[in-house]
Amino acid sequence: MKKQLLSLCIGALCVPSVWAISIEEAVTKGLTTSPEVKEVVESYNARLSIVDQATADYLPSLDLSGEVGYQRRERDREIASTTEELTGRQASLRLRQLIFDGFGVSSNIDRTEFEAEAERYRVLYFTENYALKVTQAYLDVIREQTLLGLAQKNLETHLRYQKDITKKTKSGLGSSADVSQINGRVARAQANVLSAQNNVSDVTDQYLRLVNEMPGNLIQPDVDDRFIPASLEAALELAKQHNPTVSSSLKDVEAAHSQYDASKSGYYPEIDVYVEQSFSKDYDGVRGTDDEFSAMLRLNYNLFGGGRDQARVSESASRIQQAKNISANTVRQVEESTRLSWSAAEILEQQKGYYQQHVEQSFKTLEAYKQQFKLGSRTLLDVLNTENELFEARKSYVAADYDHLEAQYRLINSTGKLLDALYVTVPKDWKAGEK
């Protein structure tokens, strides 16, 4: 009964549009058309290419070179001088295979893979946050359209009372003060409509930027309760386990460890296998042909580099500590955001109950005042005062209702489950298993 009464008090005030679009559809549309999302996805793709570049150092290198050209050589001898002209040719095929480099290549591959994983989590983090922005814009449009409907209805009410009071005054049953008062209130009601129209315009523009289309007939969303944590402790645990920015920061720490391992490769020798086949004819001023083949195992070991290797290791050790501190700070920020969202959701839910009571009681008061007016114990301005109170009560309830929905979505976002709650499917490689 209370819900029916509240529905009666709020009313269907949104202006219908041509087509309906759910919040899930709006989020999907926004994610698939956003240049910002595509930008971070391409950044992830670039990271994958960097992994391929690092892996290439494991594979053999095969180089082909060749030369051909004219050569002229003059020789002065005691007996006679000679001039020899040759067309020299030379070609070689050289293969190099790394055998050992102090684990530099393997550590570098690990680093790039961890960095790619960190970037993948950043894509998820950005996508989750973009979905939250679309969700907020979606709710803002419905809220402001509803508030505009309330303001327009309030103006209609004031115009009706203005007509009645003016008519009563002209008949000599009212005072000019009543006319002045109602005229002032009508002006304020008109200003409220203009303000509400401006707010609708602002949130519509924001929605258009995020979703790339004008809002249609937006549908009141229902938050999937399965994604609302049962307690603050459960929310914090989910956030630490599943929030993409936390996972990304942990991968950055692992990447820093791999960079540290790679920096120590300078302490070891490098061993390579070289295999070369070359052929030359009339080359380098010597007439004739040469056919050479070589297979070499080569060792290079830097015995002193001015302390460069030690400094590189020291730098990498500091990078590890830096990454750990960034990760620890990220966890704190996520925990703070989760606590704030949890607190907001709880308080707003309680406020909604009180605002609901305010709307219901204001509605009952208005009905009572109308009856008392008919009996002559209330004036039209008295009734209008209760109309205004009901209007303000409705506004407060609408604002709290959508603020509560937004707080719930923010809480789900903090736990890293917003895309799941909105049934948005992301590419499989975004959800790839951890290294």
Image (cartoon, grey):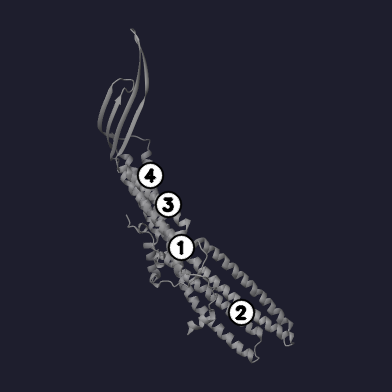
Indicate the amino acid at tag 1: Lys
- Return the mark for residue 43: 3
Q: CA distance from mark 3 to mark 4?
A: 29 Å
Look at 53% across and 73% down and name the residue there. Answer: 16
Q: Earlier in the sequence, mark 2 or mark 3?
A: 3
Any part of residue 199 in sight: yes
Tag nearer the camera, 1 or 4: 1
Q: Earlier in the sequence, mark 2 or mark 1?
A: 1
Tag nearer the camera, 2 or 1: 1
How many C-alpha atoms fall within 10 Å of the one at disc 4: few (<14), some, or many (≥20)?
A: some
Q: Earlier in the sequence, mark 3 or mark 4?
A: 3
Indicate the amino acid at tag 4: Ser
Mark 4, residue position: 314
Quarter in which the C terminus is drawn: bottom left
Q: CA distance from mark 2 to mark 4?
A: 70 Å
Mark 2, residue position: 388
Please provide percent x and percent y for residue 361. 54, 84
